[in-house]
Image (cartoon, rainbow, N blue to C red):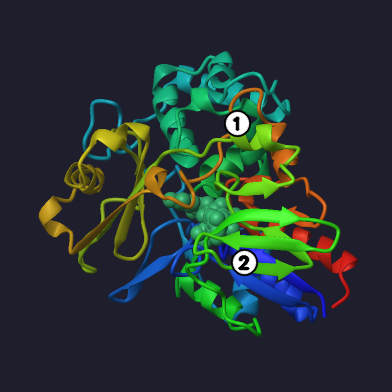
Amino acid sequence: MGSIGIVGAGVAGMVAASRLARAWHRVVVLEGRDELGGRTRSRPVDGDVLELGGQMIASRHRRMRKLVAENGLHLRREQSGLGIIRWRGPQHTRGQAIPPARPRDLAAAIRLLLALRRGPADDRLSAAEWLRSARLTPALEDMIFPALAGMFCVDLDEVSAVQVLEFVDGLGGGIPCLLGGLGNHYRIVEGMSALHDRLAATLPEPVRLGSTVTHVGQDRAGVTLGCADGRSVEVDYAILCVPATAAIAFDPPLPEQSAYDAVTFAPATKVAAVVPRKRAWQAPGFVGGSPVIAGWRTRHVLYGFALNGAAQRSDEELVTDLLAGFALSPAEAERTEVIRWAQDEFTHGTYVHYRPGEMHLRTRLARPQGRVFFASAERSASWPIHMEGAAESGAMAADEISALAAP
Ligand SMILES: Cc1cc2nc3c(=O)[nH]c(=O)nc-3n(C[C@H](O)[C@H](O)[C@H](O)COP(=O)(O)OP(=O)(O)OC[C@H]3O[C@@H](n4cnc5c(N)ncnc54)[C@H](O)[C@@H]3O)c2cc1C
């Protein structure tokens, strides 16, 4: 019987593995960490879950929503659209209500929405340059820049305008994105880790945890996956469902190595605080401020993103700033987590931002080499920073191999 090695047990890897197992292929899943989920892992908290990484599923993320339903889990709708969240201007600590728009702000907003409808910008432009070309007013700039930077986890000078415009387009365009797409989303009630556990239960063999692949060799007969502990696994085909930033040596070398050398993930930090359930809430989220640039909450967990500058800030400073955005004091946190994704040895950041002129990397990273295929969010043509993209990419790679390998 032919065998397929899957490296990485995040969304892409688990989707690929369970799809291949259902088609009666023999799959061996190797995961470097001691747990499943990669960038989507949860921790139980009283009556809720705390998500260390990805959590929001947009209504347009049909593949993820189907996956959740098929695996007997439940989605809860969360709302924190720009209409109801609070805004922290550069001089604020607490979130404030968005001030009434002046006529010139409205005119600039209309100019921006019209520009969004014109379609893809020049990839050589950064998102910041493109937005400035729409002649935003300072008030609008103070809202839109942090909202998008919070979403991409980097300053907008660092992202291609095309990537940002594709993202807005994917959520249905400017108005739906601002009013609903960014805020109207779902999350898995049982937590992301529950989804991975359910997917793992569909596999005939347990995932081999603590198996970091360092070498991938291939010849006409098959693929060898060499692990850091000296063991190796021989398979007919492999899908590397690891972030494009993973340090793995290939023999023969990858023709697209220069794309791997160039790709960058945002060095952001996710800050979370569990607060008492009965605490009265000011708002479901805020945008703007520093070091936490955007915050949102689920039932009684507050979350926020801090960008690169947070590297110099202590955990306490980050948590204090997150709570301040919701007008809460540090004493009100029952539990806190600060996840510095830039220091994560398996990911080296949160997710991809294609710099100006670098959108071409995406297709190059997805290119298979002989018997070795690749899958992960950043390799997806439609949702490169989302779980939806990881699920799509994992499913596509599994289908390509299924067509080649006899079960
Ligand atoms: C803080 C944060 C917040 C996010 N928020 C959202 C959100 O709200 N909504 C959304 O849709 N997306 C969000 N994302 C993005 C989303 O989580 C990712 O796009 C998606 O989970 C990526 O899945 P993946 O399978 O491609 O990669 P990963 O989840 O990174 O999985 C890759 C797996 O490979 C393993 N691995 C790596 N190297 C090796 C190796 N050498 N050997 C063996 N195993 C290896 C890793 O440990 C990992 O388990 C967020 C991400 C982060 C970090």
Q: Position of residue 380 (x, y in %)?
A: 69, 48
**Circle 1 Cα neighbour tier, 10 Å, few/some/many (<14 / 14–19 / ≥20):** few
Q: Position of residue 269 (x, y in %)?
A: 36, 44
For residue 302, above or below residue 210: above
Residue at the (68%, 23%) spot, across then down: 123
For residue 227, above or below residue 83: below
Decide if residue 186 is in sight here. Answer: no
Residue at the (86%, 69%) spot, across then down: 405
Count of numbered badges drawn on the protein: 2
Which is closer to the viewer, label 2 or label 1?
Answer: 2
Asked if residue 295 lies left or right of residue 254, the reply is left
Question: Are discs 2 and 1 less than 8 Å apart at CB?
Answer: no
Q: Position of residue 129 (x, y in %)?
A: 55, 17
Residue type, label 1: Ala
Q: Quadrant of residue 391?
A: bottom right
Residue at the (13%, 50%) spot, across then down: 329
Cα–Cα gap, marks 2 and 1: 29 Å
Q: Secondary structure at mark 1?
A: helix
Q: Which residue is mark 1?
A: 262
Asked if residue 71 lies left or right of residue 282, the reply is right
In this view, the residue in front, 354 or 26, is 26
Residue at the (62%, 76%) spot, across then down: 69
In this view, the residue in front, 81 or 38, is 38
Q: Say which mark, if any, is on residue 232.
A: 2
Q: Position of residue 253 (x, y in %)?
A: 71, 42
Q: Quadrant of the C terminus?
A: bottom right
In this view, the residue in front, 1 or 112, is 1
Residue type, label 2: Ser
In this view, the residue in front, 94 or 253, is 253
Specify whether tag 1 is near ligand 1 (CB below 8 Å). no
